[in-house]
Amino acid sequence: MSIVQQISSTVQQCGRASVRSVAVFLQDVGNGLLEVSHNTLALLGLMAVALVVFVAGHSELRQTVELQALGWLQARQVARIDPAVQLANDLSEPEAIARATAIDPKELTRQQAAVAQWLARRYKVAPEPVSRLVTEAWQVGARVGLEPTLILAIMAVESSFNPFAQSPVGAQGLMQVMTRVHDDKYEAFGGNFAAFDPVTNLRVGVQVLRECIARAGSVEAGLRFYVGAANLEHDGGYAAKVLAEQSHLQAVASGRLVAYNASNVTAPTPAPEAEPIALPAPADKAAEPPAAEQVATLH
């Protein structure tokens, strides 16, 4: 055998030995990894069992884990909900009905229902909130000794049943109560912002109206106090307008038909013509007395 053949044979033997060594090495590594994996899984299993046993023995911890798991599942469920449905769910508030100032007109007496329907048609408002105000006017009126139709007539003339109405001088709400003047009356309802709650405004307005009538001695004179015209020569027809509206409501409550557009403005009575008299020569303008200052609005 030649030297070349011997060298070639030796190289081949070394190559085969190297391949066998690498194969054995890889096999050993694979077996080692498999063994480690088995041991790791076994260890993890033991840890899971131990954790379950530990949690099962502590009710508070178990409840916390259950809540977290439930929250995670719900979050996954929400992620699959349609965006419009999700928005509706986020904005939903089933308890909102408790804030609504409205009742079914069918719950009213026949007399009250007739008044509520007439007011709803006349002032173009929904019958359900008006029905709530009608029942409140009947209940509060009976407690303080005022005709409920008078209370409703004032609301009609003052705000046309707009609970958010405000006058240039600051009278607010259904009965246009001067909130800053009667803020003490709103303390029992949580503060001045309650002026825009229809029922609260009605109750405070009734207190003010009752005080005005007691001070003036009659309903008509009390209305002049209510509108702030007690010290003026005339009230701009306010009292006559309220009493005319009350007359319509009383007629409706008694079962009579009253047009929805019936006027509550009475024509002023013309003053009798006075005989001409001789006027004195005009005095110095500086000597004329100053005009009386208008009083502040009470209601």
Image (tube, helix red, strand yellow):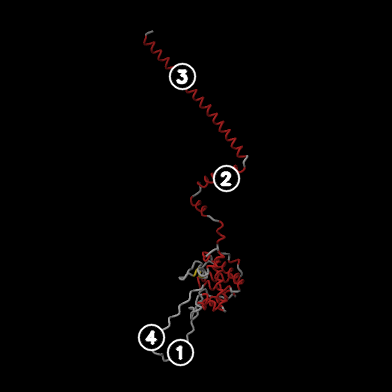
- The residue pinned by badge 3 equals 21
Q: Which residue bears the numbered disc 4?
A: 284
- CB contact under 8 Å: marks 3 and 4: no
206 versus 290 height, above or below:
above
Q: Looking at numbered disc 2 in the image, what kind of residue is underneath it?
A: Leu
* Sequence-first disc among 4 and 2: 2
User: Residues under labels 1 and 2: Cα distance?
Assistant: 91 Å
Q: Earlier in the sequence, mark 3 or mark 1?
A: 3
Q: Quadrant of residue 251?
A: bottom right
Q: Residue furthest front?
A: 287
Q: Which residue is mark 2?
A: 67
Q: Amino acid at mark 3?
A: Ser
The residue located at (53%, 28%) in the rendering is: 36
Q: Nearer the viewer, mark 4 or mark 1?
A: 4
Foreground disc of the pair 4, 2: 4
Q: Nearer the viewer, residue 126 or 27?
A: 27
Q: Quadrant of the N terminus?
A: top left
| Percent position of residue 82, x then y | 49, 49
- Rate crowding at label 2 as few (under 14), some (14 to 19) or many (20 or more) other CA atoms within 10 Å: few
* Mark seen at residue 202: none
- Crowding at label 4, few (<14), some or many (≥20) Cα neighbours within 10 Å? few
Disc on the earlier residue, 2 or 3: 3
SS at badge 4: loop
Mark 3–mark 1 Cα distance, whole angstroms, equals 139 Å
The type of residue carrying mark 4 is: Asp
In the rendered image, the residue lying farthest to the top is 1
Disc 1 marks which residue? 274
Tag 2, which secondary structure?
Answer: helix
